[in-house]
Image (cartoon, helix red, strand yellow):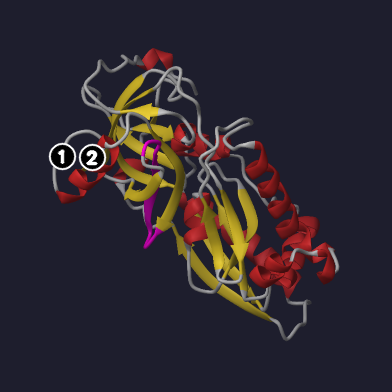
Amino acid sequence: MNSVYGSADKSDRVLDQFLAESDVFYITGISWNANQPFFRVQSNSSHTSELFPATATEMRFRVASGEPRICIGRVARTKSGPAFKQCWSPATKAKRCDPCQKIENITAANMHQAHRMRRHQVDSEMVKYLSCPHRLYLAIFRDGSSKVGTTRGNTSDNRLLEQGAWLANYIALVDDGFAVRELEDLISRELGVSQAVDTRKKYGGHLRPLPDRELTERLDLLLEACENLMKHETSASLSLLKERWSNPHSGSGLWSGLSAYPASLTQGSHAFTIRSMVGRLAACTREGFKETFLIDTQQLLALPLQTGEFEISEISMQESLF
């Protein structure tokens, strides 16, 4: 087991050694590789960051009062793909410093509006980022919410993993990110399919999930409607797909009978073990409780955290925040 406090194996000692170099550490990101989630952990003393496995991780920490929050950095879009840009400035609004938030807003606007603009109006790096094959997908979440979205490339499932989708279908492969967003807009406009699902709906869906059979039926109906719509789209740059995807963590029994974690992670001290993750949501256990708790790990980003020997805040199931 990987551990934020204590050593159980070689990987634990590496993480503990990393954290021992600093009184305060920060979790500044969650990323996926080979179907597994990783936390980006930053040390404020050495100004370094490392990726550590998030699952099977014992989290024992307290939020350090009086210490500043840190900017979680930003993601640049380049010809070779997304690139993380680390930052050490204090967070001002939300979880970023003002300059990083401004750049992030511009990048997001460029990416999502590029297909409505002339090419010379789009940032050159964004043009390079979008000038490669993209896939169009339909995804459904456990509360029944669905969305249409795009992902760069034709092999990685990381976008669906990051989103925390439960089931999905890749429905088209398109030559570039400009054309694929035109199809995305078409489906939203004609079929009323959203391009985003609020995390609160995803969270609630894990607590009160619809049966997988019903989710599959809903996705199939939506897929049929999209196929009927897109069969009239004739383009050499478009190849229709019919590839079903299911979250690789959906088969775990940990994702049934979940309870909302009954305390705020933004204050106090906590101890729990992450057993599995779907998107940024984690199924966790805590010593002394039989329940498997659902936690939104996004709450931890940018917070000043400390490890060590200290009393853990008590929780009561009557305090449920959901």
Which residue position holds label 2?
Answer: 16
On whether residue 242 falls in the magenta region, the answer is no
* Dot 1: element: loop
Instruction: Point out residue 93 in the picture as x, y percentages from the top left corner.
Output: 64, 31
Q: Quadrant of the N terminus?
A: top left
Q: Disc 1 vs disc 2: Cβ atoms closer than 8 Å?
A: yes
Q: Residues within 10 Å of mark 1 (few under 14, many from 20)?
A: some
Looking at the image, the residue that sits furthest to the bottom is 236
Q: Is residue 209 above or below residue 173?
A: above
Q: Nearer the viewer, residue 265 or 211?
A: 265
Q: Position of residue 293 (x, y in %)?
A: 35, 31
Where residue 217 is drawn, which disc sits there? none
Residue at image position (59%, 37%) is 96
Front residue of 4 and 148: 4
Distance of mark 1 from mark 2, alpha carbons? 7 Å
**Of the residues shown, which amino acid type is indicated by label 1?**
Ser
Q: Residue at x 61, y 37 (%)?
A: 97
Q: Amino acid at mark 2?
A: Asp
Which residues are drawn in magenta?
A: 33-45
Left or right of 242 on screen, residue 122: right
Q: Position of residue 119 (x, y in %)?
A: 81, 70
Label number found at residue 7: 1
